[in-house]
Amino acid sequence: MATEASLYVLLAFNPSNQLAVRRRGDRVDHAFVGSDDVAVSSELATIFPEHTTPAEYFSTTSDGATYHVSFSQVRGGAPAGGLEFHSLEALQTMRAQLDPVLAAILDELEPYLIEIPYLHLGENDYIYKFRVERDRNRSIYQQDDSARALYQSKLCEAIKALARTNERSASKPSILDFGAVHYVIPSHFGFCLGVKNAIERAYESIAENPGKRVFMLSELIHNPFVNEDLLRRGLRYLQSEKGVAFTVTGKKAEDGNTESLLWDQLTSDDVVIIPAFGATDEDKKRLVKKGIRVAQYDATCMLVEKVWKAARVFGREGYTVVIHGKSEHEETKATFSNTRRYAPSIIIRNLTEAKLLGDYIAVPTEAKRAAILEKFAGLHTPEFDPAKHLNRIAVVNQTTLLMNETASIIDYFKSLFVAKYGEVEGIQHVGGAGKKDTLCYATQVNQDALQKALSEPLDAAFIIGGKNSSNTYQLYRVCEQKLGNRAFFIQSEANIRSRCEIEHFVFPASGEHKGHIEVHPLWPADTAPKRVLITGGASCPDGLVQQVIARINSFFPAEALRSVDEVLADLAVSK
């Protein structure tokens, strides 16, 4: 019997995820192939000295030979000997010219496409690390009057300077004494590090790519003023926050609309920025196929990616991953898409839904199993089966939710399994039960700082953020629990109609309907001095906070107000 031949195929991708191929006349063949993997790797190194260590991803059999397929990412170097780079999408259009084995290998790439942009990263590396304070690009916030008005605030900068010594823990609030009105400002509010990273990368991308089309996959962050400023500078959206594609004229693709989609017109010369929430594997794969630089413009927050890494570990340890999040939110979609590669997964919205799973875990029946599959249809991995996959679970979360709610879900499952299996064995059924280490410290420290501020006597609270900002809504919920109808969710000072009326946004908490504006009373026929809490969500620019302060100040006589410089002097003394 003849021995089956073994050949080694090395697929070399450049940072744009284009594949190196070798043209031989009118045929397109492998760039690097041979019977000796060392020799193949040596040939790669000769042409592309800067490359990642080749790693085998799969093998396939064709015409009696086994092909071991490895990937490497290459940089620099001048392709020679007929070498060319083409996007995977372009290679499919050249299929008649492709070597049959190359064509067969390309057909098997789909499960591995998500790996290609990140070949230069180790498993524990992060796509886009937080910049330390000294490396921040503050110039982008000062490039013109529009940017300065949106992002700059002397008051906010002074408050944050007081808190900067400890980024991860809340301290007492700052009190801004304007005389007739006092403002209570939590020690932590507004932009988190992930948002700062994403915004700075977006403005830098525009500056670095003059003459190129620069897109955002969807909203960069959940703040309309930031996104509108970026659009004004030339960025465009590929799709809405719900994943609905935009046409070339900027309209949402709808039934009957025959306009071409921006997605379909993308080329490898285009730049696409991935937002802080991350992106689904499906969207990233589409970009990879088009030969677009995915990793270079991936602004996924480190703390979101930390959740993904935890989910991967849990999956490898044999746990089913329960994602506490809003299924319609971009971050939860991205987390689910990433997690499903490593583990059976299911999305739950709150403790009530956790208890639906818990009821089955405690006393499993076929009726309960069927009810879970019906209730969570579309919110779990395809082969998910409560009978198989709810015996060992680990909880991760959407980072913008309240920490205590995720913690209560973890504690609920922990007590459930302890009751079922006993203290020693039960705890082993809940992954990470003692750590809760996928919770976002940035979200939590804003919530902790707000709780400290709410201990002050207050006449009203204004929570500033985008209408679709989940973390802003969570801050509002904390305020609403303490202050009731004296808490207001607003987008900017424009929502403060007068001393009498506020345009308060009612957030679509259930995910089943759109939010809406309601006009709520503020201080009708009341001219007394006030104490007002103001905070901003993680995507709220400092400039908006100062504009809200200026708007409220305008309701009081000028002679009853102290100047901004006097208030700043107070803050300087308190350092």
Image (tube, grey):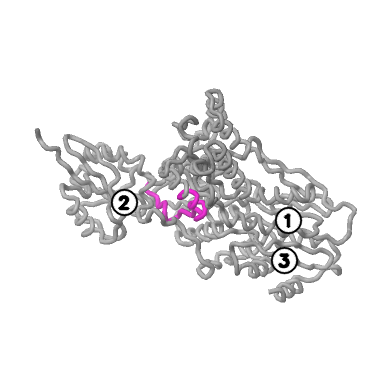
| Residue nearer the viewer, 567 or 375 | 375
Q: Earlier in the sequence, mark 2 or mark 1?
A: 2
Residue at the spot x=62%, y=62% of the render? 169
Which residue matches tag 3?
Answer: 174
In the rendered image, is residue 203 in sight? yes
Asked if residue 436 lies in the magenta stretch, the reply is: no
Which residue matches tag 2?
Answer: 13
In space, the residues marked 3 and 1 are separated at their CA atoms by 21 Å
Residue at the spot x=35%, y=50% of the render? 17
Residue at the spot x=75%, y=50% of the render? 488
| Callout 3–callout 1 Cβ contact below 8 Å | no
Q: Amino acid at mark 3?
A: Ser
Asked if residue 306 lies in the magenta stretch, the reply is: yes
Residue at disc 3, secondary structure = strand
Q: Amino acid at mark 1?
A: Glu
Q: Could you say where residue 481 lies in the image, as x and y percent from the top left?
A: 74, 48
What range of the chain is rendered magenta?
290-309
Q: Could you say where residue 416 lies in the image, as x and y percent from the top left?
A: 57, 38
Quarter residue 77 falls in: bottom left
